[in-house]
Image (tube, grey):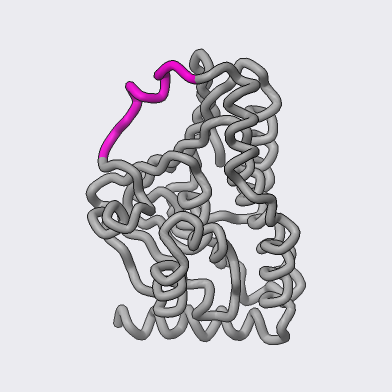
Amino acid sequence: MLSTEQQPGITTLTLQRPERGNALGPELVEVLISAAEAAIADPTVHTLVLRGAGRHFCTGLDLSDLATLSDGDLLLRLVRIETLLALLWHAPIRTVALAHGRTWGAGADLFAVCEQRLVHPDTTLRFPGAQFGIVLGTRRLAERIGVDAARALVLEGGELDAPQALALGLAAQLGDMAAELVAPLPDAATARAIRSATRADCRDADLAALVRSAARPGLQSRITAYRARLLSAVA
């Protein structure tokens, strides 16, 4: 489900659900939270890298059991994903996402919260939550690419390819930057202080925006209808 590789100063977490497009099921979210917390707490770690096994980085929220879920079940899953995203956004160490293939939904949010974001040429990104009434990660995305661009991207539910993501500033670089991961850094205390000073703490507001949107009755049916539209468009 999740593999961990340790190198001097670097922890690499690889999502290991290729048969599901590395979709974020509840178990995977919990192990990601635990692994990220462990890396952040380790004074020898200066960089946390996220990547995905198989064809895709992460295709979003795992909805394979959608028919059995209540609105409350889905709300809890989304809250735990927001917990993971906030943890990474406010991480006092360098976070790096290496994306390829589909990087959609919560997977795109996972990519966007990382400090350094690389895309393979085959990467596509989507932020479809607004299509079924969810406000997740929108403020952080606006901080990354600007309010107008983020609003349009979220409201229209469009798809970005790698060059478009680079042009918007959502992706920082095309390809592999393994050599840069070991570049000299300021001392750990200074690096943590700089990250804290450059990130306003909006965790409560971000969580409240998500809960308000997800608490509106009919979440399960809205997601079901959205998936049906997707399948119809493909057909």
> Looking at this view, is 68 or 98 the one in front?
98
User: Is 205 within the magenta?
Assistant: no
* Residue 11, above or below 174: above
Residue drawn at (61%, 23%), measured in percent from left and top?
190
Can residue 73 be seen here?
Answer: yes
Residue drawn at (56%, 41%), measured in percent from left and top?
1
Residue drawn at (65%, 57%), measured in percent from left and top?
82
User: Is 183 within the magenta?
Assistant: yes
Q: Is 33 situated left or right of 113 in this image?
A: right
Q: Position of residue 225 (x, y in %)?
A: 52, 86
The residue stretch that appears in magenta: 175-185
- Count up the numbered dots: 0
Can residue 51 be seen here?
Answer: no
* Residue 105, above or below 198: below
Q: Is 84 situated left or right of 8 in this image?
A: right
Q: Position of residue 158 (x, y in %)?
A: 35, 73
Residue drawn at (66%, 18%), measured in percent from left and top?
43
Image quadrant for the C terminus? bottom left
Q: Position of residue 129 (x, y in %)?
A: 53, 72
Q: Quadrant of residue 167?
A: bottom left
Q: Quadrant of residue 206?
A: bottom right
> Looking at this view, is 191 or 65 the one in front?
191
Q: Position of residue 145 (x, y in %)?
A: 41, 59
> Looking at this view, is 56 or 161 the one in front?
161
